[in-house]
Image (cartoon, rainbow, N blue to C red):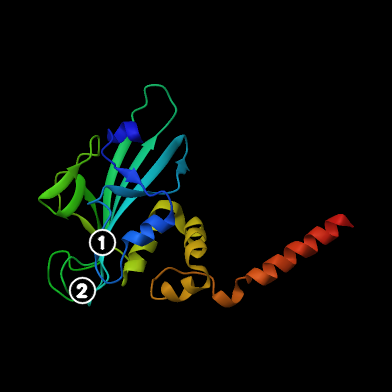
Amino acid sequence: MQNALAGQEGIAFANPGELNDLIKSDAEFSTVKTRRYIRLEDTKEGQRTICPIVYLDGDFSRKHPRLCLQLIIITHTELQDDQAECLLLRFETPEGSDPAGTGKHDYYHSQLCTDLRIDGPSNTVNVPGCVSWRAVSCPAWPIDAKTPLHVLACVVFALYGKANGMRILRGAYGDSLDKLIADMHFSFPSPSVRPSRARTRQARKKRKSKNRK
């Protein structure tokens, strides 16, 4: 990853506490300004390893909270002479001050990028080797989101799929996840038919007991 990005990525957060100290509920925050990123879990696609990192910018103190997630996705193999590939994506809340606005990107959306945006289209960080795409504002794909958390969930599902995405989100939000994503249009098992943690533990104990016998 470091070779592919030529050292432009910055420094990874070492632990969740560092990230929590930066993200405020009453003020603007930015990890790209400080060149800090979150190293996400790798995935495999055949022989290719997919390595995602993400930068967060936002302001949750506004009437309509703002969140922007800028992703750098590097894919590579162990094959000799294989060239790493790099893709930049941005997932964000409506760009205007009001989701009901009529601006070009006044809706929850994702789009291809060619550089990291710091605090506007004229202040950016170049990322070497990214997929070439010069139409900087189009296409922008609508995403299934009404809140900043929904935007985060869309990123997780895009990277890890539905089942693994739910595992990751539930590990972070526990039983509160169902309420947080209730307005999204994914079809999930009803909470009433999913086994509780207590029932799951009891079932495991029973299986172990039978195996001993």
Task: Decide: few, some or many residues near mark 2? Use Cα within 10 Å; few <14, some 14-19, many ≥20.
Answer: some
- Whether residue 14 appears in this view of the structure is yes
Q: Quadrant of the C terminus?
A: bottom right
In the picture, measured across the screen, residue 152 lies left or right of residue 195, that is left
- Please name whichever residue, 18 or 88, is drawn nearer the observer in this view of the structure: 18
x, y percent for residue 163: 51, 58
x, y percent for residue 89: 27, 50
- Please name whichever residue, 173 or 105, is drawn nearer the observer in this view of the structure: 173
x, y percent for residue 76: 39, 34
Which image quadrant is residue 67 in?
Answer: bottom left
List the residue tagged with mark 2: 99
In the picture, measured across the screen, residue 186 lies left or right of residue 122, that is right
* Three-letter amino acid code of the residue under disc 1: Phe
> Above or below — where is 185 with respect to 128?
below
Q: CA distance from mark 2 to mark 1?
A: 20 Å
Give me the residue at 15% from left, 50% from top.
136
Give me the residue at 38% from left, 71% from top.
184
Direction top: furthest residue? 80
- Please name whichever residue, 156 or 63, is drawn nearer the observer in this view of the structure: 63
List the residue tagged with mark 1: 29
> Above or below — where is 33 with respect to 128?
below
> Above or below — where is 126 with respect to 26?
above
Number of marks present in the image shown:
2
Rendered image: mark on residue 193: none
- Please name whichever residue, 66 or 141, is drawn nearer the observer in this view of the structure: 66
In the picture, measured across the screen, residue 28 lies left or right of residue 78, that is left
* Three-letter amino acid code of the residue under disc 2: Pro
Which image quadrant is residue 147 in?
Answer: bottom left
- Whether residue 92 appears in this view of the structure is no
Disc 2 or disc 1, which is closer to the eye?
A: 1
| For marks 2 and 1 on the same chain, the one whose residue lies earlier in the sequence | 1
